[in-house]
Image (tube, grey):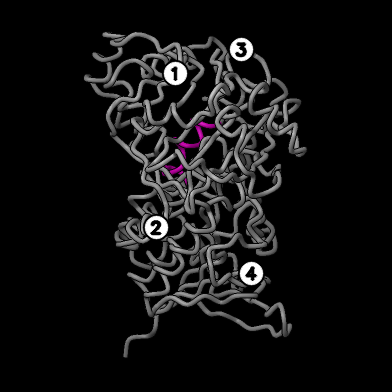
């Protein structure tokens, strides 16, 4: 008789739920362990305070989600999520001016993080092989430096402890992961750790969308220019379900957005490089107060480089690599990690060597997102860098110049925009876009004139309150 194959996933957020859905293809039983009690409706969880901020699921992650859980996209849009084409549905003031709204090549799914998590979890629970163990604390792995065979957990209400045996344990518990400490207890050396910390702070408020904003309103972003050596201040407006707009302001160390409601509005109009978002929300009904968050450090734990690694253990998502949320890459990078993990299972099944191979594949899957975030963040004043990655030491400015050329031309060249958008949405890799056609497009340079005003369609322009928008 064939023995039952079991997996335990620690953490029941998006990364954990996608991981469970993938593992259910290869094992008989998957248990997802989470310390929270899940809400019965799409509401923020206590254990995910950052969920109240704007979360962008780019197409690179959305496609993986849909492949793992078919029908999830339709279920999200039926619940009010917006499918926004990119770049045609993006109004973005970049460091190089306004981005032309070229025809769609990628997309984003715009909704609250609460709706996203609730929908994905409901889809996963349709699989009889997956169960969620709520209100449960993870205590420690069981096993040796050679193999992890399960995890000890404790019910938060009763205090009862139990052992969950598993062929594979996956840590997706996020920034608060205990794996580093657990490895130390098993006698395994600490992993190399990199951090790039801009001191970024987030402030978010949700508004009732204006009645004139019928249909899908664009995603609007006002981005800082890290080349100037000044503090980085950003603003993002995203339409979400239930006729609401979520607005997230962010600022690097010394330029943090305020928690005060009146100052929030002033920051949106005067603190960032263009007043468009501030003007769009000037007369809107606020539905929440201002929510702030400080968990924004880019941090990478190189479990992939350890000389010793126990069989049966895998770490992914923010537990391995966490990003500055301003780039919107966290969820899609986690989804790419799940896909990379699955490829290793397809190659090796659950045989010896899977854990080490998976960690290396996961590290490779998130490397582009890591470089996109950190290579920009290191330019902000006061950024604290703890890294030996030579790619961040751009002493002669060559790497920055190449990146700036592509980003600049992308605002006014359709083919270069296609490549840049592919990277931004984690739908392609840096290696994949390095093709002759991209070089030819870069040589052609700008193909359309620079925009002097926000590229709003007439019906979008009408959303602005009469007399509120004065331009700049």
Q: CA distance from mark 4 to mark 1?
A: 42 Å
Q: Main secondary structure of the magenta part?
A: helix
What segment is highlighted magenta in the picture?
Answer: 363-373
Question: Looking at the image, which residue is at 72% across and 26% down?
Answer: 255
C-beta proximity under 8 Å, tags 1 and 3: no
Q: Report which residue position mark 1 lands on.
A: 98
| Residue placed furthest toward the bottom | 1
Question: Looking at the image, which residue is at 57% across and 13% down?
Answer: 395
User: Which residue is nearer to you in this view: 197 or 140?
Assistant: 197
Packing grade of label 2 (10 A; few <14, some 14-19, many >=20) is: many
Q: Is residue 378 above or below residue 351?
A: above
Q: Report which residue position mark 2 lands on.
A: 76
Q: Nearer the viewer, mark 1 or mark 3?
A: 1
User: Which residue is nearer to you in this view: 105 or 131?
Assistant: 105
Question: Looking at the image, which residue is at 57% across and 64% down?
Answer: 11
Q: Nearer the viewer, mark 4 or mark 1?
A: 1
Q: Earlier in the sequence, mark 3 or mark 4?
A: 4
Q: CA distance from mark 1 to mark 3?
A: 17 Å
Packing grade of label 1 (10 A; few <14, some 14-19, many >=20) is: many
Helix, strand or loop status at disc 1: strand
Q: Earlier in the sequence, mark 2 or mark 1?
A: 2
Kindly identify which numbered label has been placed on residue 169.
Answer: none
Q: Earlier in the sequence, mark 4 or mark 2?
A: 4
Q: CA distance from mark 3 to mark 4?
A: 43 Å
Task: Find residue 397 and report its horizontal and vertical position in percent.
Answer: 52, 11
Q: Report which residue position mark 4 lands on.
A: 36
């Amino acid at each position: 008789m064939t023995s039952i194959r079991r997996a335990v996933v620690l953490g029941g957020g998006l990364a954990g739920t996608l991981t469970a859905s993938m593992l259910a293809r290869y094992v008989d039983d998957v248990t997802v362990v989470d310390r929270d009690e899940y809400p019965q409706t799409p509401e923020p969880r206590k254990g995910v305070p950052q969920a109240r901020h704007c979360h962008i699921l780019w197409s690179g992650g959305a496609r993986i989600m849909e492949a793992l859980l078919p029908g999830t996209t339709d279920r999200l849009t039926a619940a009010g999520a917006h499918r926004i084409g990119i770049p045609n549905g993006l109004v973005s003031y970049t460091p190089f001016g306004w981005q032309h709204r070229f025809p769609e090549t990628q997309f984003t799914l715009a909704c609250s993080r609460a709706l996203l998590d609730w929908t994905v979890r409901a889809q996963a629970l349709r699989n009889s092989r997956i169960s969620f163990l709520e209100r449960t604390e993870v205590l420690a792995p069981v096993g040796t430096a050679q193999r992890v065979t399960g995890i000890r957990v404790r019910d938060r209400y009763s205090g009862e402890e139990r052992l969950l045996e598993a062929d594979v344990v996956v840590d997706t518990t996020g920034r608060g992961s205990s794996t580093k400490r657990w490895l130390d207890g098993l006698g395994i050396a600490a992993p190399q750790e990199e951090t790039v910390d801009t001191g970024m702070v987030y402030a978010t408020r949700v508004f009732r969308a204006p009645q004139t904003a019928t249909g899908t309103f664009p995603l609007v972003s006002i981005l800082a220019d890290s080349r100037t050596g000044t503090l980085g201040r950003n603003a993002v407006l995203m339409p979400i379900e239930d006729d609401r707009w979520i607005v997230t302001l962010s600022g690097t160390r010394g330029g943090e957005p305020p928690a005060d409601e009146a100052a929030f509005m002033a920051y949106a109009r005067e603190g960032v490089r263009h007043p468009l978002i501030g003007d769009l929300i000037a007369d809107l009904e606020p539905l929440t107060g201002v929510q702030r968050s400080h968990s924004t450090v880019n941090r990478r734990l190189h479990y992939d480089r350890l000389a010793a690694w126990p069989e049966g253990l895998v770490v992914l998502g923010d537990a391995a690599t966490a990003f500055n949320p301003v780039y919107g890459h966290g969820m899609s990078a986690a989804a790419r990690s799940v896909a990379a993990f699955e490829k290793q299972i397809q190659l090796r099944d659950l045989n010896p060597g899977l854990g080490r191979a998976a960690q290396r594949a996961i590290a490779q899957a998130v490397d582009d997102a890591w470089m996109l975030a950190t290579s920009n963040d290191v330019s902000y004043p006061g950024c604290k860098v703890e890294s030996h990655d030579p790619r961040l030491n751009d002493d002669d400015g060559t790497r920055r110049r190449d990146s700036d050329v592509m980003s600049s031309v992308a605002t006014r060249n359709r083919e270069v925009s296609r490549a840049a958008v592919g990277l931004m949405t984690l739908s392609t890799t840096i290696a994949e876009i390095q093709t002759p056609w991209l070089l030819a497009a870069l040589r052609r340079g700008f193909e359309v004139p620079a925009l002097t005003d926000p590229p709003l369609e007439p019906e979008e322009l009408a959303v602005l309150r009469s007399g509120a928008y004065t331009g700049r």
